[in-house]
Image: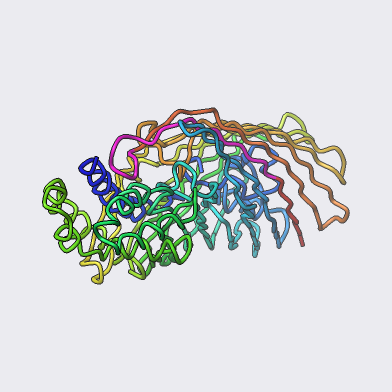
């Protein structure tokens, strides 16, 4: 019994170190994967198509070549999308559902046409992000508890049409962002075995009685300690180029390419947190416990059963976890490249139909390397991601009812880059289906209000990833859904 209890204690120490390592390497990637496909209230209503459409200033995102066909000197579009999302997880311990905050990606486009064939402009978008909040102390809390990530892109753009048939465009992407992430280091019940041992040995070592009482006072069912990683990325650069061809008065083709951007965090910070003062005291007492003296105070027949060297080794590594508190770190991850091809068809002046194919180069996200500062001995960790390239197919239609109202409908299918056997709950990807509908109202000739509603659901998927303890896998079924209302304001002068 004694030997079994000390093996449990050693396993706990080993688990503590493994969890610390897992927390350090699990920076969230930016949706499918982490793209945000809600950067236009107008085009979201058409399934977020737009590569072959002439969208004025909004073409800066979908295909910068389309901006050259602006029909006014100034074209301004501003808006916001509200994303209310949920992820359901079903595993051995039961079902849980995330309680994610409302995400509000913003977008703004300002286009100016100084002459007939030339247009210039600048845009601000949120091309990537992730926001998840799992229930406190859920089964996967040592993998992820909360994630909040935002990426912004400022894009000055120029667009030129050679004639009414072909145009080109290019933009410089200036990207930056921030993130915060929490996860548990010491899970609920981690000291139960040690509390039982302290009670058992208290008659021989009276000081252990105080420890047994302290462990009994720990909050029940709550993770005892965790870590928060946070940081701002440095400014990174990329480019967006495109071409648009009017095959006829009714048919147009478009293609665009957004380059990969490497987002780097150079001054991130790690901070430990505890469930309460009792948890902090118990954890630090165990970390600094003089195990040799403790073993020496026990009867020889008891001490001989204790794997002292192994426990001391694990205790030493567990102390390294404390070194992460307040430590700085560096890390980098990609916002992947995106290639779009689109076709648009206008059977009449009042109808427009569009289809886009999007290919995303997620294979650029092979691994994540995190390097901590010298206070940790330049501790470095590497995590395999192994994402696959993915694609999305989008379709949408628009009908002009009158000078006052236009209606739209659309849908898309988006595949996931995440592999089932390396499936971390921080980015629960799955085959995604989305249906959209929207309308535009123009109370004034120069002013339009865009309204859109989209519903997204993901196909249930069973996935697994290495457990934070390093033993076995954490596995279960994931299913996600989201509703995405959006509003935009457009002005033409």
The residue furthest front is 203
- Count of numbered circles in the view: 0
Residue 469 in the image: x percent, y percent?
A: 31, 44
Q: Is residue 193 visible?
A: yes
Q: Which quadrant, please, contains the C terminus? A: bottom right
Would residue 110 appear left or right of 221 to someone viewing this image? right
Residue 99 part of the magenta-drawn span:
no
Q: Residue shown at 11%/52% (left/top)? A: 300
**In front of the other: 207 or 276:** 207
Quadrant position of the N terminus in the picture: top left
- Please identify the dominant SS of the magenta region: strand
Verify whether residue 469 appears in magenta: yes
93 over 142 or under it: above or below: above
Name which residue lies at 52% across and 56% down. 148
Residue 153: % across, % down = 52, 60
Relative image position of residue 85 (x, y in whole percent): 62, 43
Q: Is residue 314 left or right of residue 255?
A: left
Q: State whether residue 38 is above or below residue 352.
A: below
Question: Would residue 65 be found to the left or right of residue 375 on screen?
Answer: right
Image coordinates for residue 404, horizontal then vertical, percent: 87, 46
Foreground of the two, 381 or 90:
90
Q: Quadrant of residue 72?
A: bottom right
Asked if one can make out residue 174 in the rendered structure from this viewpoint, the answer is no
Q: Nearer the viewer, residue 234 or 466?
A: 466
Residue 272 falls in image quadrant: bottom left
Q: Residue at x 63, y 36 (%)?
A: 456
**Residue bounds of the magenta highlight:** 466-484
How was this image coloured? rainbow
């Amino acid at each position: 019994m004694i030997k079994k209890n000390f093996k449990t204690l050693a396993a706990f120490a080993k688990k503590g170190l493994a969890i610390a390592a897992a927390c350090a390497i699990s920076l969230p990637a930016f949706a499918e994967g982490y793209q945000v496909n809600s950067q236009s209230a107008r085009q979201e209503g058409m399934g977020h198509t737009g590569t072959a459409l002439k969208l004025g200033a909004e073409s800066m995102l979908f295909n910068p070549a389309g901006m050259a066909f602006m029909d006014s000197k100034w074209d301004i579009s501003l808006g916001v999308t509200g994303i209310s999302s949920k992820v359901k997880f079903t595993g051995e311990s039961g079902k849980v559902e995330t309680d994610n905050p409302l995400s509000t990606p913003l977008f703004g486009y300002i286009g100016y046409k100084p002459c007939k064939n030339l247009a210039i402009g600048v845009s601000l978008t949120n091309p990537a992000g992730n926001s998840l909040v799992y229930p406190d102390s859920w089964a996967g809390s040592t993998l992820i508890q909360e994630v909040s990530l935002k990426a912004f892109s400022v894009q000055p753009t120029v667009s030129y049409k050679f004639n009414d048939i072909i145009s080109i465009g290019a933009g410089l992407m200036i990207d930056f962002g921030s993130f915060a992430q929490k996860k548990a280091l010491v899970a609920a019940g981690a000291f139960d075995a040690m509390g039982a041992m302290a009670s058992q040995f208290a008659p021989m070592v009276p000081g252990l009685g105080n420890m047994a009482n302290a462990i009994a006072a720990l909050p029940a069912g709550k993770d005892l300690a965790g870590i928060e990683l946070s940081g701002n990325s440095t400014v990174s650069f990329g480019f967006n180029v495109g071409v648009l061809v009017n095959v006829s008065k009714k048919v147009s083709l478009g293609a665009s390419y957004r380059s990969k951007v490497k987002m780097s965090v150079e001054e991130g910070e790690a901070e430990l947190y505890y469930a309460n003062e009792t948890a902090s005291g118990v954890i630090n007492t165990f970390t600094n416990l003089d195990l040799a003296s403790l073993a020496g105070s026990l009867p020889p027949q008891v001490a001989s059963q204790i794997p002292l060297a192994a426990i001391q080794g694990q205790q030493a590594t567990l102390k390294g976890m404390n070194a992460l508190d307040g430590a700085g770190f560096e890390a980098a991850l990609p916002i992947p490249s995106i290639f779009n091809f689109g076709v648009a068809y206008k059977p009449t002046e009042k109808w427009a139909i569009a289809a886009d194919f999007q290919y995303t180069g997620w294979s650029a996200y092979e691994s994540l390397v995190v390097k901590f500062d010298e206070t940790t001995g330049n501790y470095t960790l590497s995590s395999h991601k192994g994402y696959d390239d993915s694609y999305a197919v989008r379709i949408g239609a628009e009908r002009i009812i009158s000078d006052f109202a236009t209606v739209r409908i659309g849908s898309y299918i988006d595949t996931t880059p995440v592999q089932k056997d390396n499936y971390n709950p921080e980015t629960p990807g799955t085959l995604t289906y989305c249906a959209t509908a929207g309308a535009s109202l123009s109370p004034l000739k120069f002013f339009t209000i865009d309204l859109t509603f989209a519903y997204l659901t993901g196909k249930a998927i069973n996935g697994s990833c290495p457990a934070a303890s390093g033993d076995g896998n954490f596995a279960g079924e994931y299913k996600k859904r989201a509703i995405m209302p959006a509003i935009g304001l457009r002005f033409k002068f």
